[in-house]
Structures are given as structure tokens and as C-alpha cells.
Image (cartoon, grey):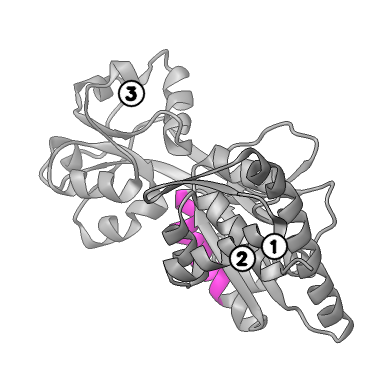
Amino acid sequence: MLDIYEMEVFLAAAETGSFSEAGRRLQMSQPAVSMQIRGLEKRLGVELFHRAGRHINLTEIGQALVPLARDLVNHAARVQEAVASLQGEVIGVLKIACSTTAGKYVLPKVIARFIEKYPAVQVVCQVVGREEALGMVVDGEAQVGISSLRETAKELEYRQFINDPVVLIAPPDHPWARRPFVTVDDLPEGRFIRRETDSGTQQTVISALAEYHLSPNDLPTVMILGNSEAIYMAVAEGIGVAFVSRRAAAEGIASGRVIEVTVKDMNMTQQLYLVRQSQRAATTVQTAFWEFVYSPLSRDILC
């Protein structure tokens, strides 16, 4: 008989591509993960991973097993949750895939209150790119996603999560920091630090610039960085100016390490959406979280 726990370990290894990363996710040692995988392979009589030193890759049979294992684990979780629900409890694991802004600046507060109300729930949150977040929801790797990307996939249900203003920040000694505002015509005179093109923040900036017949190529770029924290620190060090999520820069603006610069007639807001599968039966935990997000208990956080 198959062991659900072995399947969970197999999925963690398949999704991370590493026994050691799977161990970190599951709070297990790497040897313990290897032992579970070997046990599963022996039970099935097949090889699930190609092993080359520390690197692993799924075999063809391993790839075929992933969706089946995921369904098995999800069904087992639903059985546990259904029994708990009949007893008036909300229990289980909630897997969330979210973008950087939501994952680091908004979601922790929401999760803290959610767990306070439902202490028997374990939340697993993975901070990933916006496209990957949607993919994880579609594939069943996550029950809930938070992303600024809204695709037309029929199997996804979207609901507005937060509005995230995008603002221009500059070092305190920058000439723009002393002005009441700058205009769009001033922007090509700056030295910009920016996110990679496919980030939600950068896409918001690109759309706003296009209204003035400008593109990021019209703004001198001195550095491209992969996350908002690195950009904020680079601006604070005086390297240049940047468009960032106001939530990401809030502490720096409040402390005076960076200055928010008003760009006249240019208001940018990135919308983030809560996403779930619409064609797959919702778990009790997923439904509880979905309803909790829009309840009075989290309203002040999402303002």
C-alpha cells in the first residue's frame, strides 16, 4: 500500500529538484528524504529520479507520477479536512504562491490573524514570480495564489486583493528630493535603478510611461535588480532613483533614508489579485482563508 507521507516527500523533491531543498521544506534531513525516496522506489519497483552527485532529475516514470501523487496527497488532505469540518474544526495545510510585494509586506499580517483564528492550520507560503504563482495554482501545487497577472484561463477565479501604489524614490541629497514635484519630461534626466522587465512593478511603470510615449529605454538605467529591497538599498546609497512599490519602501520613506518624489500627473497603481482554481473542489482551509481575507478581521491590513 502506498504511503501518503512518501508521496509528500516525493512531491517536495520533484518540485524543488533537490533532496536537500525538499528536506528544508519538510523540516527533514537530506538523508531522511533520500531514505523515503528509496523506499518509495523499492515499493513501486521503478527509478523515479536520475541522480548525478547532488543533482536530481525526474525520470520519465517520475514525471508521470507527479500529477497522480499530487491528486493522492490532495485527496488525503480533503478527507482529513472533511472529518475535521464535520466536527466544526478548520484543520489542514494551506499552500499559497504569491508575488514579492504580497508575500513580504502584506500577507504575513493576514496569515498571522488567520492562524490566530484557526490555530490548527499550517500555512506554507512560497514567494515566486507572478507567472509562476498562477502556474502553481493551475497545477494544484498551491491552493491560493496572489499575483498582479490576470490571465483569461477558464479554470482560474480572480478577486481583487490589494491596490499597490508605485512611487518614485530618490536619495535625500538628490536634487529631485528637494523639489515639490518633477514632471514626466524630467525623467530622462535621472539615473534609474529598476526591476527586471517581467516583474509586476516594472510592467506597471512600462504601461504608465507608454501613455506619454516613453519606454524604459528612454530613462537612463544604471542598474537592474531582482527585488524591491535591493533597489531600495541602492537608492538609499545614492546610486540612483527608482520606481518601487510604496509598501516596499514605506519604512525607508518614514525614516527619511529615501524620499518619495511626486511625478506630476502620473499616478501608478499595481493591482494584486487573489486567485484559486474554479474547476477543482475547494478544501475547507482554502474556503476559510478566501472568506477570511474579505472579512472585517483583515480589512485594515488591506487598505
- The residue type indicated by label 2 comes to Gly
Q: Position of residue 35 (x, y in %)?
A: 53, 67
- Figure quadrant of the N terminus: bottom right
Q: Which quadrant of the structure image shows residue 4?
A: bottom right
Q: Residue furthest top?
A: 213
Q: Position of residue 7 (x, y in %)?
A: 67, 62
Please tell me the numbered disc located at residue 39: 2
Q: Nearer the viewer, mark 1 or mark 3?
A: 1
Please tell me the numbered disc located at residue 184: 3
- The residue type indicated by label 3 comes to Val
Name the N-terminal-most of marks 1 and 3: 1
Say left or right for 34 vs 171.
right
Residue at (25, 23) in percent of width and height: 186
> Element under label 3?
helix
> Element under label 1?
helix
- Figure quadrant of the C terminus: bottom right
**Which residue occupies the foreground of this view, 116 or 215?**
116
Query: Magenta part of the protein: which range?
Result: 100-112
Q: Position of residue 164 (x, y in %)?
A: 49, 47
Badge 1: residue crowd in 10 Å (few <14, some 14–19, many ≥20): few
**Which residue occupies the foreground of this view, 93 or 7?**
7
Name the N-terminal-most of marks 2 and 3: 2
Badge 3: residue crowd in 10 Å (few <14, some 14–19, many ≥20): few
**Which residue occupies the foreground of this view, 104 or 285?**
285
Please tell me the numbered disc located at residue 43: 1
- The residue type indicated by label 1 comes to Arg
Marks 2,1: beta carbons within 8 A: yes
Q: Is residue 96 visible?
A: no
Say left or right for 108 vs 176.
right
Marks 2,3: beta carbons within 8 A: no
Residue at (39, 49) in percent of width and height: 246
